Image (spheres, rainbow, N blue to C red):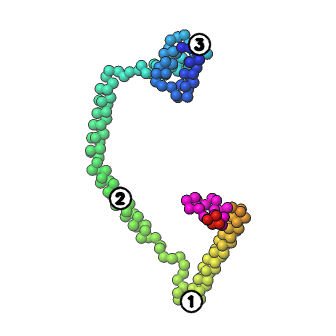
Amino acid sequence: MDTEKLHKLLEKYWSCETSVREEKELQFFFSEGNVPEELRQYIPLFSYIRDEQSITLSDDFSERLQNAIEAEAKQRYVTIRIFKPLLRIAVSVLLVVGMGISFYFISKQDNRPHFVETFEDPNAAMRQATYALEKLSHALRKSETVSMETIHFIDDLDIDWTAIDSLNNNNPVETDSVKSER
């Protein structure tokens, strides 16, 4: 094999573009023995591939594998078969105990509101209602201020919204110039 063809074939090999036939050619070339000095570094790679492809299993491998699988399957089946009813009972007991503990803690929780009932004292009720409404009003004013600042910031960006609106891609907005052309 000439050097130019060999270099092209190696380049295809490193790019993972070779066919099986071309890879066999490379393996055969590097196993011959008359490899140029600059390509001797690739001999272990191609001999490794050839050596690995020649490895075969022993004659009794499938029989030993089958025996090992059967021995493991018998051991597991016996263990599971013995403990299966006990596992069902244990899971049932655990489930009942867990539900009982959950119901106990739920019933012990204090689900009453933590504020004082003031329906008997109208002035106290009015003060609490006023306080709650003031807090709500303050929060709404703050959110309105932030919203307005955001809107002013976006307006200052001077963005052409019709150009970037994804809904307008299917149904473009008619502008004055388009209307005048019709």
From the viewer's side, name the closer residue of 74 and 47.
47
Label 2 belongs to which residue?
95
Question: Which region of the structure is painted magenta?
Answer: 160-178
User: Residue 98 in the image: x percent, y percent?
Assistant: 38, 60
Label 3 belongs to which residue?
36
Q: Is residue 45 above or below residue 141?
A: above
Tell me which amino acid carries mark 3: Pro
Q: Which sits earlier in the primary sequence, circle 2 or circle 1?
A: 2
Q: Is residue 19 left or right of residue 61?
A: right
The residue furthest front is 182
- Element class at badge 1: helix
Q: Which sits earlier in the primary sequence, circle 1 or circle 3?
A: 3
User: Residue 181 in the image: x percent, y percent?
Assistant: 64, 64
Say few, some or many: other residues with alpha carbon within 10 Å of mark 3 (under 14 / 14 to 19 / 20 or more).
few
* Residue 181 in view of the camera: yes
Residue at the image point whose x is 70% and y is 66% from the top: 155
Inter-mark Cα distance, 1 to 3? 105 Å
From the viewer's side, name the closer residue of 69 and 79.
69
Using the rendered view, name the quadrant where residue 151 is placed: bottom right
Residue at the image point whose x is 64% and y is 78% from the top: 137
Quarter of the figure with the N terminus: top right
Residue at the image point whose x is 31% and y is 22% from the top: 60
From the viewer's side, name the closer residue of 175 and 102.
175
Label 1 belongs to which residue?
122
- Element class at badge 2: helix
Say few, some or many: other residues with alpha carbon within 10 Å of mark 1 (under 14 / 14 to 19 / 20 or more).
few
Inter-mark Cα distance, 2 to 1? 50 Å
Q: Nearer the viewer, mark 3 or mark 2?
A: 3
Q: Is residue 176 above or below residue 25?
A: below
Question: Would you say residue 99 sits in the magenta stretch?
Answer: no
Residue at the image point whose x is 51% and y is 25% from the top: 18
Q: Nearer the viewer, mark 1 or mark 3?
A: 3
